[in-house]
């Protein structure tokens, strides 16, 4: 792995172009991308919110449910990297439209599953489209938004994960109570198809690409020579399973351990994800504010990440609390600090690498996220089936983010742009 920390010295032409770029954020584009990431998570969490119902109907153990989650994660980790490459090759307009159409159809197919195996297969197909969408969306932000404002824009786009997770319990739970879980899957799947015309319309407009020069393609073999790419890979492999656990297991925990029914989960299950959505804006906004005030990218990122990573451990308190309110408060604070950390981590490929590398590096890091999530979800299923001990699970998950931040710091080194010619 390369230890090259040489800083980019942009050409005079590039500097002139940068100086002429407007500081106004293209909010219409960002809001459409926010819609895509929100629908992404809403579709993704259909099985999560419905897990108590599906587990009872299909007679699934914790290990069976873990295998359903990991069938999604396995495809996700593959197509996160593949999606980054596709976005680099065919452009974000075509790539994101393709991924959205695919996962919308696959999401609707969940309505026709009859057991663990068929549900696992459909979830695998769903992840093929969803895995590719994130690097495409982040690439669109990275290439079209001015550098000092990019952190805020990434935070807005990334907040779709929290908004979708926040909307999932009340919307999916409410629809399932009214119309049944199969109709709910069809409705949520159709949302992506309704989004497509907006994306196709907004990308017809002429857009000034602030980070041009993407014609020369970057191979995976080239990317893996940089230790900065491995820093993001391992950081997300260790840290992101924290989020995977909460989004896929929180409804189960509230149902099995706290005794809440589907209606009650729909009422309170959105709260932690609302708080995490706020954190996306806070994390991205603070970073942008600090950088615009003259802080170096390295100083801003590391300060924010080192403050938020240890704070995410507060979720460990949840299983020790007798009060549901205290439990949800601890979980909410935990995911709040995680998301502040995470929104800065997803900026690292753009901080370290030239724009033409971003989609590939972002996709490569997503493979790390998938591998780490598969391992953690498997272990969670085994631990719960063997011991039924959620305290042990929450404790282990709580240590992930501080460990991930330590790895990023040690492996990646200073956060500054590498020389574009390497």
Image (cartoon, rainbow, N blue to C red):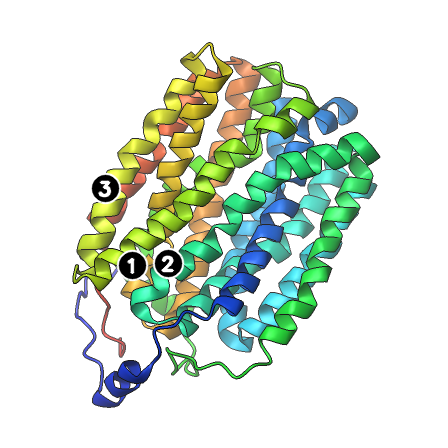
Residue position for label 3: 306
**Closer to the camera, 118 or 172?**
172
Q: SS class of the residue under badge 3?
A: helix
- Across and down, in percent, residue 76 comes to 56, 50
Q: Residue, x 21% and y 88% (percent of image)?
A: 12
The answer to the question of whether label 2 and label 1 lie on touching residues, with beta carbons closer than 8 A, is yes
The reply to whether residue 63 is in sight is no
Q: SS class of the residue under badge 1?
A: helix
- Across and down, in percent, residue 257 comes to 56, 15
Quadrant housing residue 176: top right
Residue 288's tag is: 1
Q: Earlier in the sequence, mark 3 or mark 1?
A: 1
Q: Earlier in the sequence, mark 3 or mark 2?
A: 2
Residue 152's tag is: 2
Question: CA separation, marks 3 and 2?
Answer: 19 Å
Q: Residue, x 55% and y 25% (percent of image)?
A: 381
User: Could you tell me which quadrant the C terminus lies in?
Assistant: bottom left
**Closer to the camera, 367 or 416?**
416
């Amino acid at each position: 792995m390369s230890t090259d920390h040489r800083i980019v010295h942009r050409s005079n032409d590039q500097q002139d172009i940068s100086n002429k770029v407007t500081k106004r954020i293209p909010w219409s584009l960002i809001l459409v991308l926010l819609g895509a990431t929100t629908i992404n998570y809403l579709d993704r969490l259909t099985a999560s919110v419905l897990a108590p119902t599906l587990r009872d109907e299909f007679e699934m153990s914790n290990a069976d449910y873990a295998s359903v989650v990991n069938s999604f994660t396995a495809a996700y980790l593959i197509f996160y990297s593949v999606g980054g490459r596709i976005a680099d090759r065919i452009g974000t307009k075509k790539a994101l439209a393709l991924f959205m159409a695919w996962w919308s159809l696959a999401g609707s197919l969940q309505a026709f599953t009859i057991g663990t195996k068929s549900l696992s297969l459909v979830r695998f197909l769903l992840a093929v489209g969803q895995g590719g969408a994130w690097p495409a969306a982040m690439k669109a932000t990275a290439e079209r938004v001015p550098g000092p404002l990019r952190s805020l824009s990434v935070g807005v786009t990334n907040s779709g994960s929290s908004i979708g997770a926040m909307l999932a319990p009340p919307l999916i739970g409410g629809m399932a109570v009214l119309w049944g879980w199969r109709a709910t899957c069809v409705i949520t799947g159709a949302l992506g198809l309704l989004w497509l015309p907006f994306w196709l319309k907004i990308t017809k407009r002429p857009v000034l690409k602030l980070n041009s020069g993407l014609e020369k393609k970057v191979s995976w073999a080239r990317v893996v020579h940089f230790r900065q790419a491995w820093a993001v890979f391992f950081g997300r492999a260790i840290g992101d399973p924290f989020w995977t656990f909460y989004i896929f297991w929180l409804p189960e925990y509230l149902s099995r351990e706290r005794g809440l029914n589907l209606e009650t989960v729909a009422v309170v299950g959105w709260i932690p994800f609302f708080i995490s959505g706020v954190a996306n804006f806070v994390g991205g906004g603070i970073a942008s504010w600090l950088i615009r005030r003259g802080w170096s990218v390295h100083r801003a990122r590391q300060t924010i990440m080192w403050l938020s990573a240890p704070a995410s451990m507060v979720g460990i308190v949840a299983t020790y609390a007798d009060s549901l309110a205290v439990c949800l408060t601890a979980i909410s604070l935990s995911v709040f600090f995680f998301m502040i950390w995470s929104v800065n981590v997803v900026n690292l490929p753009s901080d370290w690498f030239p724009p033409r590398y971003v989609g590939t590096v972002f996709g490569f890091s997503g493979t790390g996220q998938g591998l780490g999530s598969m391992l953690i979800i498997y272990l969670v299923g085994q631990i719960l089936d063997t011991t039924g001990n959620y305290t042990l699970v929450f404790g282990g998950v709580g240590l992930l983010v501080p460990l991930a931040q330590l790895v990023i710091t040690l492996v990646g080194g200073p956060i500054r742009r590498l020389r574009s010619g390497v």
